[in-house]
């Protein structure tokens, strides 16, 4: 009996060991090293100090930059969700065969390096492009103008890069919404709008939150997109971190800024994750509402 | 530390053998592979000249590419020494590399073109460390004022134009701390090697109001300049020449306040496995036949630059020299801010300043 | 029956919405494809048709090596992620204690919520410290660490949905743990494993930042090669390569579709 329990224990350890070891070496220890470096401005051998943190707090510059970064990434994430919602919903209503093909097709843009996608955005947003002409006709842009080299261009690029993932995640949530439930609600007199509010929205909410988190995180760490598209005032925290780590050769201050970015990102992620139970409560309230009908 | 007679003999043989082999020409380095670290599409991997080198020496060449000068130093620090033979650091990076003993001293008596190199590079302290020469100047270029002549008239003669309120939203500026600080110092009339950083900071913040794009690659500049998003800025002379050769209108100006000049150099890596072959390469790559072939018949996508070897410049056909803007650059006698010799502590301050200007 | 209802549910308006969404998604790709046939080396208009860049692509051939390396590397990472990830998921769902599960999930989440810029840098610091430095092994481990979580989460979700009684039944009929897994559990979670593997492959193939920090000097994967080329002046033969990659992928998809790969658990549920 005892040997059997031991064997079960051993199997458990063996199952976990490779993944656990990998994550420890490649995720946990690196993050710990980052914290350590942030206290070692004079290099790993010198005594620890708070100098890098002092530099961070000496100016509001980096906090403004962190705020700007979070707002840009947040806006881009929300736009991605708004654009991905309708296609994901239609996708979830398709017959299985067509659905699989379409889903696979959605991965295709993802297989092209985003470094190349950036360059196609140049064409799409350049002066005289259809997008800019439309904006001009709407009175939103001056003739010959373009939103290239502004924060808006960075947002457009971030949305593009992450749209496939968003559609994927939203779809996986919506897929579980049973058509019979919708049909039943319809036959009980629920309008299209009511069905959306009372059934679809609450049931897709968890995947909406997941989707927002999954696209928001890489958006917050972006630095290639703002460097190429964002113009002089479009730089984000990621650019400064990359510069500190490479050109300025100051891994300590780079680590401090990384931790700032990490904390800011985690705060937003926690906020979003906190929405989940709130949405859930909302759902149950709605269903209480609907149930007696 | 006693040397036995036998090992003395052996080392004497080792010293003379390559010399004999060199005299024998083509077969000298047969079977050896020279490892070169440089930029992609920049001279060292030009197919036409490589073929010449391989025929002359019998050796073959392996290319390693870096994407920034820091990349190069890091490459040498993390296992590159002992594997890579010869590298192409910027003038600015020779001293740091020598100080960290990533590269070895060079015996200038073995460099055939040494006496033909432009004195402003050959005699510069930034290729010397501890009294020894560590690098052979190879090519040069200016990062100077470039404008679109159709949209900027009359042609400016001063850096002022970039700061002019009328230039708002039209400026492309090179994203590099040394260039930025030096350019601002020239504009302000400060000493570009040691300017008043408070004034420089203010000038760069003013400049930023006019800037549309901080460019960092040829491609960044081309996309913005050719679509009219920017009409002026500071630009590498080589890129201005390439654009002109491709039929685009660019005026390249060496302003009256002075221009920023840079140089790329060849250096031999510490513990290079094929040091003799590395000397052969440097001799080849600084020779007139090399430059004539590379500049007049470059392989696809080769980025060209002006030789530091004055004999090689004289030997260039006129069209090729014009494409490089070699004439104005070599003839230029105005103030020069040579991108070299900045102490590490000062450089760190400059970098911080530039990061803050960009982040503001 | 269900087929009918599905058709009933999809109105022409909805198809239009999907079409518009897909068009939006593919617009940059179409631009890349168009530019690969455009003569201007700077991607500027007017459009002049040429096949020149396809010739350059094969003549220069500097792009094909990195593409092949990226494919091999990503395939290796995806296969390893499938194995390690499935083991981890089985442990998580069937064996983990409460605390263990929370810790494991937390670490997996960290691997995908820490921006890659930071994680890649931090990985490099550690790899340098333990002597691996920038190497193929480092890049393999790094890519594996960021793609593993997707497999674990997708497979774990599927595992949770499987009735444990099925496994108990097999066990009580005398099947060993391994046989139970191979005969009962594995076939049930196979679609999830496949879809996790696919996502892991895409993640590894296209992740520029981890590769940027961990790739050995002189070794170039496709994203790194593209980055280098862009730094020194990029030419439309890159667009030609992207067009070829997209065309090949589309062909593969068509083939899979023909072969009757219906619902291979796609896309699986993400955390």
Image (cartoon, grey):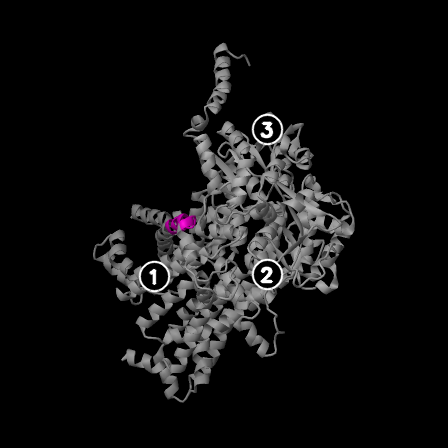
Q: Residue B41 shows which numbered tag?
A: none
* Res. B126 image quadrant: top right
Q: Residues within 10 Å of mark 2 (few under 14, many from 20)?
A: many
Q: In which quadrant will I find the N terminus of chain B?
A: top right
Residue B61 rendering spot, x and y as whole percentages: 45, 36
The mark lying in front, picked from 2 and 1, is 2
Q: Residues within 10 Å of mark 3 (few under 14, many from 20)?
A: some
SS of the residue at dot 3? loop
Is the same chain shared between marks 3 and 1?
Answer: no
Mark 2 in CB contact with mark 1 (< 8 angstroms): no
Q: Residues within 10 Å of mark 1 (few under 14, many from 20)?
A: many
Q: The residue marked by circle 3 belongs to what chain? A: B
Q: How many numbered marks, from 0 up?
A: 3
Q: Residue C192 shows which numbered tag?
A: 1
Q: Is residue C61 magenta?
A: yes
Mark 2 in CB contact with mark 3 (< 8 angstroms): no
The residue range painted magenta reads: C59-73
Magenta segment, prevailing SS (helix, strand or loop): helix
Task: Name the residue at 59% across, 49% down.
Answer: B323
| Residue A29 relative to residue C69: left or right | right
| Residue C221 relative to residue B201: left or right | left
* Res. B31 image quadrant: top left
Looking at the picture, tell me which residue is in the foreground, B326 or C6. B326
Residue that badge 2 annotates: B224
Q: The residue marked by circle 1 belongs to what chain? A: C
Q: Is residue B249 magenta?
A: no
Residue A13 rendering spot, x and y as whole percentages: 37, 48
């Amino acid at each position: 009996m005892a040997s059997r329990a031991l064997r079960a224990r051993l199997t458990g350890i063996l199952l976990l060991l490779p993944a656990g070891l990998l994550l420890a070496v490649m995720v946990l220890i690196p993050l710990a090293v980052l914290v350590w470096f942030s206290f070692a401005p004079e290099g790993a051998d010198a005594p620890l100090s708070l100098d890098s943190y002092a530099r961070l707090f000496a100016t509001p510059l980096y906090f403004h930059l962190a705020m700007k970064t979070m707002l840009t990434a947040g806006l881009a994430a929300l736009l991605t969700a708004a654009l991905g919602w309708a296609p994901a919903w239609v996708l979830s209503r398709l017959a299985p065969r067509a659905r699989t093909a379409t889903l696979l097709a959605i991965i295709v843009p993802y297989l092209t390096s985003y470094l190349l996608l950036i360059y196609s955005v140049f064409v799409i947003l350049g002066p005289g492009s259809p997008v800019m002409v439309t904006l001009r006709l709407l009175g939103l842009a001056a003739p010959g103008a373009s939103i290239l080299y502004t924060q808006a261009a960075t947002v457009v690029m971030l949305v593009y890069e992450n749209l496939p993932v968003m559609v994927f995640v939203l779809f996986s949530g919506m897929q579980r919404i049973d058509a019979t439930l919708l049909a039943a609600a319809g036959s009980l007199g629920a309008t299209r709008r009511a069905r959306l509010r009372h059934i679809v929205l609450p049931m897709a909410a968890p995947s909406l939150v997941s989707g927002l988190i999954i696209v928001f995180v890489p958006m917050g760490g972006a630095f290639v997109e703002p460097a190429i598209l964002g113009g002089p005032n479009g730089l984000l925290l990621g650019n400064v971190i990359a510069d500190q780590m490479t050109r300025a050769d100051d891994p300590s201050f780079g680590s401090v800024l990384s931790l700032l970015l990490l904390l800011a990102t985690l705060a937003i992620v926690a906020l979003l994750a906190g929405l989940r139970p709130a949405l859930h409560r909302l759902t149950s309230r709605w269903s209480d509402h609907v149930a007696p009908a | 530390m006693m040397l036995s007679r036998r090992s003395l003999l052996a080392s004497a043989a080792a010293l003379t053998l390559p010399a004999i082999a060199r005299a024998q020409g083509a077969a000298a380095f047969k079977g050896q592979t020279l490892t070169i670290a440089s930029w992609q599409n920049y001279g060292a991997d030009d197919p036409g000249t490589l073929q010449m080198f391989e025929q002359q020496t019998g050796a073959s060449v392996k290319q390693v590419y870096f994407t920034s000068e820091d990349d190069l130093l890091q490459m040498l620090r993390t296992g590159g020494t002992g594997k890579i033979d010869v590298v192409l650091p910027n003038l600015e990076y020779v001293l740091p590399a020598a100080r960290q003993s990533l590269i070895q001293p060079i015996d200038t008596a073995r460099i055939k073109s040494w006496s033909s190199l432009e004195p402003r590079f050959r005699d510069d302290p930034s290729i010397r460390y501890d009294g020894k020469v560590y690098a052979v100047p190879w090519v040069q270029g200016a990062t100077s004022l470039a404008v679109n002549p159709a949209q900027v008239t009359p042609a400016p003669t001063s850096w002022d134009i970039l700061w002019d309120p009328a230039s708002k939203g039209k400026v492309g500026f090179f994203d590099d701390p040394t260039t930025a600080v030096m350019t601002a110092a020239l504009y302000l009339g400060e000493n570009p090697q040691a300017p008043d950083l408070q004034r420089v900071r203010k000038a760069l913040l003013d400049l930023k109001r006019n800037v549309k794009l901080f460019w960092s690659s040829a491609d960044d500049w081309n996309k913005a300049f050719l679509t009219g998003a920017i009409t002026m800025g500071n630009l590498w002379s080589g890129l201005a020449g390439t654009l002109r050769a491709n039929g685009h209108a660019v005026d390249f100006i060496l302003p009256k306040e002075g221009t920023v000049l840079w140089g790329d150099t060849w250096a031999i890596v510490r513990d290079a496995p094929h040091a003799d072959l590395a000397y052969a390469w440097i001799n080849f790559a600084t020779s007139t036949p090399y430059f004539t072939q590379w500049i007049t018949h470059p392989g696809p996508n080769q980025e060209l630059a002006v030789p530091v070897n004055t004999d090689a410049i004289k030997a260039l056909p006129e069209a090729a020299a014009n494409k490089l803007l070699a004439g104005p650059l070599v003839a230029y006698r105005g103030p020069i801010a040579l991108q070299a010799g900045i102490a590490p502590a000062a450089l760190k301050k400059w970098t911080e300043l530039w990061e803050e200007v960009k982040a503001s | 029956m269900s087929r009918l209802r599905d058709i009933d549910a999809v109105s022409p308006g909805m198809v239009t919405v999907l079409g518009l969404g897909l068009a939006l998604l593919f617009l940059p790709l179409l631009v890349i494809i168009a530019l690969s046939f455009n003569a201007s080396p700077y991607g500027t208009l007017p459009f002049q048709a040429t096949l020149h860049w396809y010739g350059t692509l094969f003549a220069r051939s500097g792009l094909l090596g990195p593409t092949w390396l990226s494919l091999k590397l990503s395939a290796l990472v995806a296969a390893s992620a499938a194995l390690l990830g499935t083991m981890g998921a089985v442990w998580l769902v069937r064996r983990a204690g409460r605390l263990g599960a929370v810790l494991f999930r937390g670490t997996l989440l960290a691997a995908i919520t820490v921006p890659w810029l930071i994680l890649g840098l931090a990985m490099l610091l550690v790899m340098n410290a333990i002597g691996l430095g920038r190497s193929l092994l480092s890049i393999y481990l790094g890519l594996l660490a960021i793609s593993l979580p997707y497999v674990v989460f997708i497979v774990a979700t599927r595992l949770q949905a499987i009735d444990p009684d099925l496994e108990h039944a097999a066990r009580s009929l005398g099947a060993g743990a391994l046989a139970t897994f191979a005969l009962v559990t594995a076939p049930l979670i196979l679609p999830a494993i496949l879809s996790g593997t696919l996502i892991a492959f895409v993640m590894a193939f296209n992740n520029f930042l981890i590769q940027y920090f961990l790739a050995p000097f002189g070794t170039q994967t496709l994203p790194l090669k593209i980055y280098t080329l862009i730094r020194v002046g990029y030419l439309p033969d890159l667009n030609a390569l992207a067009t070829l990659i997209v065309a090949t992928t589309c062909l593969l998809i068509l083939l899979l579709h023909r072969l009757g790969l219906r619902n291979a658990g796609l896309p699986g549920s993400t955390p």
